[in-house]
Image: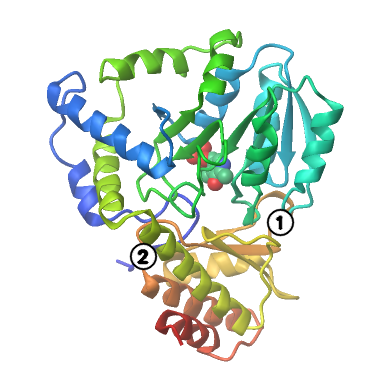
Amino acid sequence: MKKRFIMAPGPVSVAPEVLLKMAEPMMHHRSPQFSAILTEVRENLKYLYQTDNDVLIFASSGTGGMEASVTNLLSRGDKAVVVRGGKFGERWAEICEAYGVVPINIDVEWGEAVDPAEVQRVLDANPDAKAVFVQAHETSTGVKHPVQELGEMLKGRDAILVVDAISAVGVYDLKTDEWGLDVVVTGSQKSLSLPPGLAMVSVSEKAWRMAESSNLPKYYFNFLKERKAIAKETTAYTPAVSLIIGLREVLAAIREQGLEALFAHHRRLSDATKAGVEAMGLRLFSKAPSEAITVIEAPDGVNGQDVVKILREEYGITIAGGQAQLKGRIFRISHMGHLSDWDMIVALAAVERALGALGHAVEPGAGVAAAQRVFAGA
Ligand SMILES: *Cc1c(COP(=O)(O)O)cnc(C)c1O
């Protein structure tokens, strides 16, 4: 059996201690024991999100949380500004269209962050827009959008800011309340180092007012029903019990080490990996790079998909390629999940070797040495 590593931006590596907890005998979800766990998880989610608002938990992938944010907040025929700078920005627009919400798209060059002045201009031209949909971190391009500025901009307006932070919450400092992020969506299988299957959504007072008048069709994903269930220390429907038990473990560990340590961990892996990539003579794709992933441009003459394939099939290492128009042009190494310095050394060494095999010679150890220097603080 081959030793395997997973360093793709979701699903990510899960700590063995967490996997073992999730394998314990099933607990009934309407029991005092489970209610106590839910209450603890909800409190710790607020800490992670840096919010005083409730964080709703649904059993779905992250996209379920995105869809729920459209169907619970908007109404038929509403206009919404959508920042489209990658695969996930496109998803916001697709969900809006699926439900009869009219997206006003701001198309941003893939690899670049949206200019807040452009959002301001579009909002001024569309004063009736009910929401702005954006990614905190667009995982397909590795770009961080300036959601803090957008939050400030929307504070004095009626429109709400809905942030897909599936690869941002728990990665870097994202201040939900302080920055005025009305709705923040995340999922279990990225920075929370859990298997896929949970979506979490925080909802501000301003957003709750919109939820109360929303008339889009919804059933399972119902914010108001979930809020009522929270008051009773339960969930509206059967929750993903095992995943919530895993989430409890992860959040307790985060709480113990503190948010700063969590952010520093991702920064460290990211800084070292980026230094390694540049030392190999490769270019970073993102103009506003994040601590969640490193996005690498495939050098001339190399197809990024071949790098991904050699790593997976020959070395047992899963990284990610590019999506849509970036397929073949980039490859991506995740810093999310149960990872340490040594995993990044493995990823860099593997990329060095794969590039050599593909005819793009890299001095063996060049990337690894640069990463080692960052890790050693030299
Ligand atoms: C992974 C991801 C999603 C989608 O999540 P699924 O869990 O695959 O539904 C949405 N947005 C961003 C930014 C992501 O990274």
Q: Amino acid at mark 1?
A: Leu
Question: Of the residues under marks 1 and 2, which one precedes in the sequence?
Answer: 2
Q: Residue at x 24, y 34 (%)?
A: 40
Q: Which residue is mark 2?
A: 4
Q: Amino acid at mark 2?
A: Arg
Instruction: Report helix, strand or loop for mark 2.
Output: loop
Q: From the viewer's perspective, is residue 154 above or below residue 264?
A: above
Instruction: Report helix, strand or loop for mark 1.
Output: helix
Q: Is mark 2 within 8 Å of ligand 1?
A: no
On the rendered image, what quadrant is the N terminus found in? Answer: bottom left
The numbered mark at residue 326 is 1
Q: From the viewer's perspective, is residue 248 above or below residue 154?
A: below
Q: Residue at x 36, y 51 (%)?
A: 193
Judged from the image, the quadrant occupied by ligand 1 is top right
Q: Residue at x 41, y 32 (%)?
A: 52
Front residue of 349/334: it is 334
**In the displayed image of the protein, which residue is found farthest to the right?**
125
Q: CA distance from mark 1 to mark 2?
A: 26 Å
Q: From the viewer's perspective, is residue 16 above or below residue 206?
A: below
Front residue of 277/119: it is 119
Please identify the quarter of the rendering in which residue 282 is found.
bottom right
Q: Position of residue 109 (x, y in %)?
A: 79, 52
